[in-house]
Amino acid sequence: MYKRLLDYNDGEELELVLLIKSSQLLHTKKGKLYLALTFCDASGEIRGNYWDAGSQDAASYSEGTIVEVDGKREEYQNQPQLKIYSLRVVGPEEGYDLDQFIKAAPETISVMKAEIYNYASEIINSTWSKIVQYLLKKWNQPFFDYPAGKSNHHAVRSGLAYHTVSMLRDAKALTANYPQVNRSLLYAGCILHDMGKVLELTGPAATQYTTEGNLIGHLVLIDEQIMLAARELKISPESEDLLLLRHMVLSHHGKYEYGSPKLPALLEAELLHRIDDLDASIYAITNALQQTKPGNFTANIMSQGGRKFYRPKEDQALAESQKLE
């Protein structure tokens, strides 16, 4: 049987064609240059260092490059890594496609699409319902194909839809416990809050930020899309319902230092921010734990302030959970 990247055990040598997911030219403590690389295929990703590198190597082995890796899987600080013997750039004539190396969300697009549209159908406010339906139709393909981020969380094909449906499930449970929350507004916020990432990111393969993503960002980009939708749907820009929906997406990062242009000023906006942060954190921590042996700590998780998390020796729930990446 053909073995993929994560099928190898520590100590096993490998010769695989992989995608470079990230590449950074760094200095050692002695001032020598090396490339810190992350390799991936559809099974997952592993880091490795290419020593004694130079600027030409950085150009050759950049993000999004398909390479043949000759090396060995090892363990460093309780985390897998590749000891690299050699690298070779794989040319387009060799028949490899970027899609072959992309990890996908653990749920199928068809299942997530049906569930998200079902939640959308429960939005009873006419303004919010029309805008959500309009934008789901307009951005349907990338919304269900794109990742939710470049690296921090849900950075897989269909990760944006997976993040969205997970948040909607949380919203459903919380509104059942807190009936004072406007469920329609919260559902609309969950569906739209990160939809601007279809403009902020380049797609699921070797994901990068677009020019719009770098200069404007997905919060403002989706606000613009809401206003364009309102114009097409003949919804007054002075409508309070429209203002409430815009506030939901513009404030969902929760704090100015997190890139939010406004702080949440609605109960539903505060809840949206907390659900978003909760789902992103659970994903990042779970993903790190799943790649950690029982009885050990994860690597430092940058999105969680560089903290490490312990994987108990016995944890049936984690062992039986869906593999995220």
Image: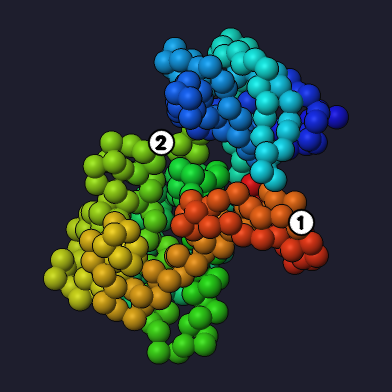
Taking 288 as reference, is 101 above or below it?
above
Q: Is disc 2 placed on a helix, strand or loop? A: loop
Kindly identify the amino acid type of the residue bearing the numbered disc 1. Answer: Pro
* Residue drawn at x 80%, y 65% as measured from the top left: 314
CA–CA distance in space, label 1 to label 2: 33 Å
Q: Quadrant of residue 82?
A: top right
Taking 150 as reference, is 240 above or below it?
below
Q: How many marks?
A: 2
Instruction: Give the number of the disc on residue 199.
Output: none
Is residue 199 shown left or right of residue 246? Answer: right
| Residue marked by disc 2 | 208
Place of residue 58 in the rendered image (x, y in percent of width and height, measured from the top left): 46, 19
* Residue drawn at x 28%, y 36% as measured from the top left: 211
Place of residue 236 in the rendered image (x, y in percent of width and height, measured from the top left): 16, 68
Taking 236 as reference, is 46 above or below it?
above
Q: Quadrant of residue 43?
A: top right
| 71 vs 15, nearest the viewer | 71
Is residue 145 shown left or right of residue 243? Answer: right
* Residue drawn at x 34%, y 44% as measured from the top left: 200
- Which quadrant does the N terminus fall into? top right
Is residue 91 shown left or right of residue 132? Answer: right
Q: Nearer the viewer, mark 1 or mark 2?
A: 1
Taking 104 as reference, is 262 above or below it?
below
* Residue drawn at x 73%, y 31% as measured from the top left: 73
User: Is label 1 in contact with label 2 (beta carbons under 8 Å)?
Assistant: no
Answer yes or no: is residue 64 visible: no
Place of residue 194 in the rendered image (x, y in percent of width and height, measured from the top left): 39, 56
| Residue marked by disc 1 | 294
Q: Is disc 1 placed on a helix, strand or loop? A: loop
Please identify the residue farthest to the front as the structure is shown: 30
